[in-house]
Image (cartoon, rainbow, N blue to C red):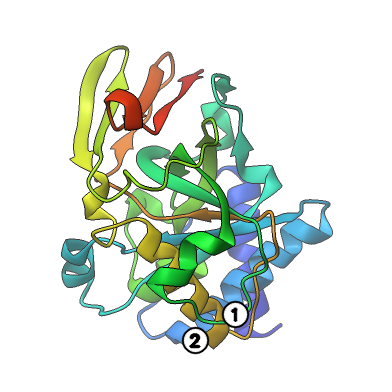
Amino acid sequence: MSIIHEAAALLDDAAREHREIDQFPAGHFTLAQAYEIQRASIQRRIERGERHKGIKLGFTSRAKMVQMGVDSLIWGLLTDGMLEEDGGSVDLARYIHPRVEPEVCFVTRRVIDAPLTSLEAADYLEAVAPAMEIIDSRYRNFKFSLEGVVADNCSSAGLVVGAWSRKFDGLANAGVRVQFDGRDVLVGSTGAILGQPLRSVVQASHLLHAAQMSLPAGSLVMAGGATAAVALTPGLHVQCRIGSGHGALGCVAFTTR
């Protein structure tokens, strides 16, 4: 078995069996091979009956790029098996050591099959929604290298998406607040997402083009974390609110068990 398929099987089995694994040795595979591992791992999910749902972006914060010593975004793939219900109950037994972070989610209305400009991005989108991503590294102690996290689908595990709207105008610097049982645990701004979340769609189009991939109409684009992530424990009511007043994007919430 090749390094690609061996690593993909190891990571996929770890996610499916909710168990952590050791990091791969330094230099075990390149960044390009890490993306091949990511695709092979997701393909195993597709073969079990899940469907492609879109993409997620990571390292959309300049501070995070500097921390990891990279100068570009990373990205992972979403399937319908990752979707959790807005307002529903999330079973943490499905995860290993889950954390949540607030995000902005877009849904496409046209196929994205070429690099877009900032002026074009909104024309390719149907709607936007407040969202939360549940990230869950398969590596022990949530520790990983750049290549390791890419192979592990950029720690993507679950997502909760709120109500859709066409409120694209107020995305540049909207306030973001995540609460556990009514208590603030994360506070930030959508400006942390590349300065403007719509830029994530532009970046996604370039990354897809470079990978010789396209994104069908009706796909999700998770724009990247607006703040750091915080660990989840059972018995919480988790709510994320983006924006305020008339132009607010709205709320998304779930409970944990």
Give the image location of residue 98, x and y in percent.
Answer: 43, 38
Q: CA distance from mark 2 to mark 1?
A: 7 Å
Disc tally is 2
Classify mark 1: residues with Cα within 10 Å, few (<14), some (14-19) or many (20+).
some
Viewer-proximal residue, 108 or 79? 108
Amino acid at pointer 1: Glu
The residue sitting at 50% across, 70% down in the picture is: 151
Q: Quadrant of the rendered structure where residue 195 is? A: bottom left
Rendered position, 247 above or below 107: above
Relative height, residue 190 to residue 180 (above, below): below
212 lies left or right of 231 = right
Helix or strand or loop: what does disc 1 sit on? Answer: helix
Residue 200, given in percent of the width and then of the height, sits at: 40, 63
Seen from the viewer's position, the closer of residues 188 and 139 is: 188
Q: Which residue is mark 1?
A: 36
Q: Quadrant of residue 10?
A: bottom right
What residue lies at 16% left-to-right and 71% top-to-bottom?
Answer: 66
Which quadrant of the figure has residue 36? bottom right
Determine whether, in the image, residue 159 is placed left or right of residue 61. Answer: right
Can residue 241 be spotted in the picture? yes
Q: Is residue 138 visible?
A: no
Label 2: how many Cα within 10 Å (few below 14, some 14–19, many 20+): few
- Where is residue 142 shown, x and y percent of the image? 35, 52
Circle 2/circle 1 CB separation < 8 Å: yes
Q: Position of residue 205 (x, y in %)?
A: 51, 74
> Hey, what amino acid is under mark 2?
Ala
* Mark carried by residue 189: none
In the depicted structure, whether residue 251 falls above or below residue 82: above
Out of 145 and 82, give the one closest to the viewer. 82
Residue that badge 2 annotates: 32
Q: In the rendered image of this protein, does residue 238 appear above or below residue 65?
A: above
